[in-house]
Image (cartoon, rainbow, N blue to C red):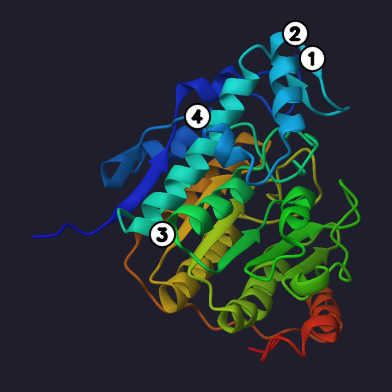
Amino acid sequence: MTSTPRFAVIEDPRYREHRGPPGHPERPERLAAVSRALDAVRAALLPLPAREATDEEILRVHDRTLLSHVAAAAARAPAQLDPDTFVSARSHEVARLAAGAAIDLASAVARGEAASGLAAVRPPGHHAETDRAMGFCLFNNVAIAARALQAVHGVGKVLILDWDVHHGNGTQQAFEADPSVLYLSLHQFPYYPGTGSFGEIGVGRGEGATVNVPLPARSGDAEYVGAVQRVLGPVARAFRPELILVSAGFDAHRDDPLAAMEVSAAGYRTLARSVRALADELCGGRVAAVLEGGYAPSGLFEGVEGLLAAWLEPPAPAAPPDPVRPGSVLSGVLERVVGIHGSRFPGLGAA
């Protein structure tokens, strides 16, 4: 009798060996909060090992000069790559482990060995551009996983949802000219790194396959959940992805020290439920999340706990969206998104 695929998780103590200077917010202790959330449900999880991504896998996204730059920086560590991004002696190895975990988690989901899962990795990845490490990120884990899905597993269309509080400039750059990977980001704007305006929609053949939903400071559950229900839903149904990847940052949480958003534990649970319901509807439930930011222990714990609760519970239809109040922040955001993308995605902004 065939067993039902389970929720997979990739952890490794080596992820704590990447270190910045004392007081840096992207610190090893972040993973302790993630582990506490996982501890409550370990019996239901499928553990997978971590392994280093190969040069070939990383070079599907990054230039060889970046590989050499990160390796050289680690060899002379401690080193600083930009005002926010630091490298310690084992950072090159750990960054490869993070990229390898993203690949292997997505691959396990693509093969049906896991129903869904989380790669609890460090360092994060979505700011890393083709030739540049930045914003705490060395290699772009989610982008590398998306290219592996296409190159190895024959996955034609991948949707990347990025709900980290910062815009994933590196992921957008990697796919902005490629219509086979749809990138949708919810993020605080204006804020670091300064990209992700409504008008950034992709270039050339990729025009329309980048959907940015910039949100003002103090946005919370109503704005995030409303955008997922009224933007992600119609976009995903039109795009018809074969697998969904989530850049799962938890720094939009109300306690996070690096941002000014107000998402609650209940908000993250509803976000995860909405994504799970879309994946069940469109791509056989195939969804893989990779940890990005999140710098408050409470935010990381509550965010991961909500994701686990939503993706481990029995399948259920998504709850109907709440009404949009005229004149609200959500109303204004939806109006802008519909004005730019409405002709491409039927039902955009609707209930």
Mark 3 or mark 4: which comes first in sequence? 4
Q: Which one is closest to the eye, mark 3 or mark 4? A: 4
Q: Which one is closest to the eye, mark 3 or mark 1? A: 1
Identify residue type, mark 2. Arg
Identify residue type, mark 3. Trp
* Circle 1 residues within 10 Å: few <14, some 14–19, many ≥20: some
Work out whether residue 173 or residue 270 is closer to the camera in this orientation and state it. Answer: 173
Label 1–label 2 contact, CB within 8 A: yes
Percent x, y of residue 43: 26, 42
Which residue in the protein does label 1 denote? 79
Which residue in the protein does label 3 denote? 311
SS label for mark 2: loop
Q: Gap in Å between the C-alphas at discs 4 and 2? A: 21 Å
Q: Which one is closest to the eye, mark 4 or mark 1? A: 4
Q: Gap in Å between the C-alphas at discs 3 and 1? A: 39 Å
Q: Which one is closest to the eye, mark 1 or mark 2? A: 2
Residue shown at 81% from the left, 78% from the top: 337
Which residue in the protein does label 4 denote? 52
Q: Is there any visible trace of residue 115 in the rendered image?
A: no
Residue shown at 52% from the left, 28% from the top: 32
Label 3–label 1 contact, CB within 8 A: no
Percent x, y of residue 256: 72, 42
Q: In this view, does 328 lie to the left or right of 136?
A: right
SS label for mark 4: loop
* Quarter placement of the N terminus: bottom left
Which residue in the protein does label 2 denote? 76
Q: Gap in Å between the C-alphas at discs 1 and 2? A: 7 Å
Mark 2 or mark 3: which comes first in sequence? 2
Identify residue type, mark 4. Glu
Residue shown at 57% from the left, 21% from the top: 93
Label 3–label 4 contact, CB within 8 A: no
